[in-house]
Every structure is written in C-alpha cells, then in structure tokens.
Image: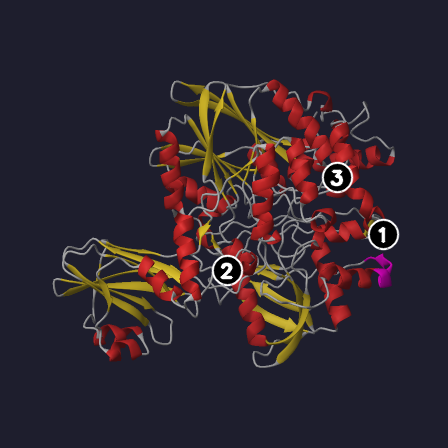
Amino acid sequence: MHMNRREFLQLLAIAASSGMALDSKSALAGTAPANFYDVPRHGNVSFLHMTDCHAQLLPVWFREPNVNIGIGDAYGKVPHIVGESLLKKFGIKPGTAEAHAFTFLDFVEAAKVYGKVGGFAHLKTLVDKMRAQRPGALLLDGGDTWQGSATALWTDAQDMVDACIALGVNIMTPHWEATYGADRVMEIVNKDFKKAGVDFVAQNIVTNDFGDQVFKPYVMKEMNGVKVAVIGQAFPYTPIANPRWMVPDWSFGIRDDGMQKWVDEARAKGAKVVVVISHNGMDVDLKMASRVTGIDAIFGGHTHDGVPQPVQVKNAKGITLVTNAGSNGKFLGVMDFEVKGNQVASYKYRLLPVFSNLLPADPGMTALIKKYRAPYEDKLNEKLAVSDDFLYRRGNFNGTWDQLICDALMAVKGADASFSPGFRWGTTLLPGDTITMERLMDQTAITYPQTSLTNMTGETIKTIMEDVCDNLFNQDPYYQQGGDMVRVGGIEYSVTPGQTIGKRINDMRINGKPVDAKKTYKVAGWAPVGENAEGAPIWEIVSTYLRDKKVIKGIKLNEPTLIGVKKSNPGIEDFGGVMKP
Amino acid sequence: MNALRRNVLKGAAGAGTVAVAVAAGLLKPNLAMAVAPRSAFEAKNVGDAMSAMGASSPADSKDITVKAPDIAENGAVVPVEVTSAIPGTTSIAIIAEKNVTPLVAQFDMLGGTEGYISTRIKMGSTALIRAVVMAGGKSYTAAKEVKVTIGGCGG
C-alpha cells in the first residue's frame, strides 16, 4: 500500500476516532501486525540488547526527537538523522508501525493507533519469544535501568533489580546506576546479582588510587559451542555529568587502550565473538570502533538513538558493527551472528519496537510490578493537572516538558531565568492526558533533585551555556557527554552549533533586554552535582505549580535562534524556532 | 595483593603520611623532584617558564606520549602520564598552559631510567598539558588538551 504522508495522517485520524487501534484485527493495512514478531533465527550466536529503559516498568509513550544535529564528520550521518530523512535512509515506509516507532512524525495521531510502547511484562514476553527461537542467547543490559521512575527512586532501585533478574538479564554495564552511590551499587552487584548469576562488567571503571579494576572488565561465555566475550563500557563521564561525590573512589573515562587490551586478551583466550555493551553514546562508540580493533559489535546506548540497522565501522583490522537501541523500554535489539571457523561470517540485526498491544503481558512480571507499586499507588496516581498540550522532552534544545519545568521554576522561585538539565529520558504525554505525580517523576526522579535560586552575572550565565553546548557540539566525539543542551527559561538566545566554545551562544536576552555581562540575575535550577545541596526537590516545585494551574495549555516553547544550520540538514525537521544562515 | 596495598595505605593515612606513600607508589624509583630554577616555577606564562628552564623553543616530538583524560573528572587532581622514548632523556617537565604559574613539575631522570612519569596535577581551566623533555642537551615537546568543565546536565 502506498500513500503520502497527508493521506496517512487522515487515515490515522479516522482510525483513532473510530477506536480502531493496533490490537484490533482490522488494524491498518500495511502495518502487518500479525507476524510483526516472527523473527527467524540466523546463525548460531545471538545477543538480545536492551538499554536506557530508565526504570519504566509499565508501557509509556515516547516521542523520538525532531532535532538531533550532527557536527563535523557526523553531519547527516546516523544517528543524526530524524523524521522523513531517517525513513528514507533505512527504507522504512511512511505510515507503518516502524515509521511510528523510529520517528516523531505525526506522533500524537499515530500513538493513538499503535498504542503505548515498552513495559517489562510485555518485554518479558518478547524476550522469551526471541529466546525460544535462539537457545543460549544472552540478554545484555546497557544501563540507565535503575533510574527514571518514582518507584525506582523510592525503592532504592530494588524494583528494577528484581525486574531485571526476572526478565533474565545476563550481563549489565552502568551509568545512572552510579547515582545510587558506590555502596548501593556494590551491594546489588555482590548480593542480588551474584545470587542470580548476573554479571556486572565495566572495563573503564578503575580505582582512583591505583587504577585497579572495580568490576570485571568482561566475561566469557559459551554459546552453542562457541566462546564469546562480552566487555562492559560504562558511561565515561559519570563523575562529571553526575555527582562525583557519589562515587568518590572511582575513575571512569573512555580508556581505548584498556578496551584494546581486554579485546586482545579475550581473543587470546579463544573468544570467537567479542562484543561490547556500551554506555559511551553513539558518536563516541563510532569513534572507538574506528580505533580499537577486534570487536564484532558494540551494542550502544546513552544517546537514546533508535537506530534500525547497525553502522559498519572500518578499522585497521576489520569491521565493527555499532548499534544504538533507543530508550524507555521502547526497543529490543536482536543480533544474530553466523560463526564459521574462527570468526563471524554474517549477521542479521533487528531493532524491534516493543508495542505493548501486540505482546500479551507476562503474568509473573505483571505480579512483580504490581507488588512493588502497591505501597505507592495513591501517591503515583495523584492528579496534579490536565495537559491540553503535547508534552515531550527529547530534542537538542528544548521540549515542552522541560519548558513546563523551567516555567514552574521561575514562577515558584521568583526567578528571572531558569535552567533544567538536557536529560534525554522522560516519557511523553498526549494532549488531554492527566499529569499524575508518576508522570512528573518520570521527568525528575533522581537522587540529587534539589532546586536552587542563585544570583548569577550575565557572564556566568553565558559561561554555563557555552560549557554545556560544547558537551553537545564539540567536533570531537570524545569531548561530547551525550546529553542535550541545557534547557533555559526566560533567556532568549541564538546558537551556532558549528562554532567553538565561547562563540556559540549569542544574542542573549532576558525580559527582552540584552543580557549584561556584569549585571546580576536571579537564576533557578536543579540537579546540582555538588555535595550538601539543600533546596526543595524539583518535583515539589513543579507539583506546586501544576496544582495551582490545574490545566496546562499554550506552553511557549523557548527555542533558540539557530544559526548556520540549513533546513536541508537531515538532523532537523519541523523546528519551532527561527533558523538563519 | 591490591587490597593489601590499599590497607597498608589506609594505615599510613592514620600516621598522616598517605600523601607521601601515594606519591612514592606513583613515581618510579630513582626520580627526584627537580632542578629547574625557582624562576621557572614562578613564571606567569608558558614562554617565560620554558626559557627559564632552558627550553625556549623545543622541537615537537612524536616520541613523547602525554596520557591524560580528555575531560578532567576533578580539576584538582588530573592524572597525567608522560612517556619519552627519546634516547638519553634527562628530564621531563609538565606544563599546564592556562595555570597561573604554568610549570607544574619537572622530574630529573637518573642515568638509564625509563623516560616515564605518572603524577597528578591541578588545573584551573581547559588547557593544553604540555610535556617538555630534555635529552642530549636538546629540548622536545608534545601536548594534549584536557578539558575542565562545569559538570552536570549529562544524559
């Protein structure tokens, strides 16, 4: 079936209004849901990969970004392509379930047809189905699993630990896990995971004093008679992007040399397949794959890129496949290798969207989730407001959810301006949805939630914005930290991504007046990386604002003026702000 | 073994000598803190510091490796390793170009010592970390940028 986008949109609208959703047998022609998860096995070695679920145990909405700009060599390349450009690149037909999963296009209308995504009970059914077809397959968890929901925060990650064990995770590497503190991480690794036989690997976490490995750098397993090695790569900038004081004795970093050493050691011990579960972020993974040899595949996360097919990266000794498996439980990566003789002869990869309506909930997992939620149901379901607006977070510069947080910070704190971190997690709400405490916690549930009101000079404000912008747009991926631009309330500005640090942020205005470098402004913010912060948690500030407002509508998205990015850039579509040459 | 080493150090911390012990553990034997004149350590810019240590125009060398993080986890203690494969290396100096007094350290290598040092330095802001190696009466250099960021706001 062929139709253009407008026709598809009309069809979606009709489908939604007539209550025809994806789970109905009469779902849209062309979506072919009946055999959606029939994925024949290829070869003899298989890995299932999940990453960055951010503790979302139940199905959610999650909108992919419409702005994800690639800088320098990354211009127009995966993962810096969005919307229609992405569909074209991967040959995905508009108007299909895949098109909805991988892009922001017509999100609200399509979401009503295809339903929510993810949820561990549905994911469990999918994992079991894939495993039944692939005896011996290993389930790898790329991290950012224990953080991102109210229940994960309130149970000190125990709900996620138990859910992952029940799901059948075999091997894991961390990022946000570290924000529960080193002691808690060690407790889970040495008790829960040890008992369950889950390996926790990270080649790039060493002690600050002697550089000793804190965790196993890799594990060897045998799968259908083939020796395989799985190396862990934690988020290299954990002590910079998150509070260092929570892991005071650990040093991270990229550590290419260490990676090469462990790959060589694993090969020497007979591994015929060597893969990495990585929390580097995709741009860093692509660079690492070009420098380190002997890796068959890097299963990546952190940057939350839903990439349908791996990028093949050439290096001195061969080719390394680099994947990225999205976020929020929305996808499961399935990599099948055919191993012949001493090496991988061929592969097949799918990034399967987890459509909750197409996958019956696993009863055991449903019961486990219910048990963990039970003590908190009243709190989770508290209705704070109704949103007439479409609330989402992802995108290089801003999202409506972040704008709402910035607006709340300014209003409640009496600030001239506000900052909110460029996190890439956080679920999506459709217009008309109720904002419950649970949905607010999806955006804010961290272990350092304190808010602040600080007097900052115009110069300091610019320095902060330049610093964060360089973490996003530095030409060298090894200097990128994988988050998006800090969200700002009350400050208009222009940004030139192609510039260098100190020169990207210009035309700054507060209340319509140019920002004075010497003048002091009251700036509200949250998520301090320093120790002993005392302000009220961000969810208190925003819930106060929401209860007062009751109905959220007409959010004014503060997008910067974008300079030097053309409309033809495959990393941007439907940008709400001004674009200048 | 490592646990033992750490416990020994913890014991030493009680005696207030941990800094010395760590330094001793990090440095190769036979190295002594150095001999660049006081004026080199007090110099306020890179040019003056290099002149004062007798290395006013060192040649760029690929035989020097400067290993340091791309982004510092803690600007107060940035780990830096310098390896010089230049035969007859007699000293290795470390310069943090944007520091108020850029010359951080100079290590003299006794005859036959491997040209390798590992230490931690303090950095105020993003800068090139430059190694200056003296060998056979000549000076050589290599540098690596280390970024010092405000932190926060990550993924």
Q: Give the amino acid type for the residue marked by disc 1 in the picture.
A: Glu
Q: Which residues are magenta?
A: A547-553
Query: Would you name the residue on which mark 1 appears?
Result: A382
Q: CA distance from mark 3 to mark 2?
A: 35 Å
Q: CA distance from mark 1 to mark 2?
A: 39 Å
Looking at the picture, does residue A569 appear above or below residue A324?
A: below
Looking at the picture, does residue A10 appear above or below residue A179?
A: above
Task: Determine the image quadrant of residue A366.
Answer: top right
Are labels 3 and 2 assigned to the same chain? Answer: yes
| Chain of the residue under label 3 | A
Position of residue A459 measured from the top left corner of the image (x, y, whole percent): 55, 75
Query: Would you name the residue on which mark 2 appears?
Result: A470
Q: Residue at x 59, y 37 (%)?
A: A193
Asked whether, in this view, residue B100 is left or right of residue A359, the answer is: left
Q: Residues within 10 Å of mark 1 (few under 14, many from 20)?
A: some
Q: Considering the numbered disc 1 on the image, is that residue within a helix, a strand or a loop?
A: loop
Q: Considering the numbered disc 2 on the image, is that residue within a helix, a strand or a loop?
A: helix
Asked whether, in this view, residue A147 is left or right of residue A199, the answer is: right
Observer able to see residue B137: yes
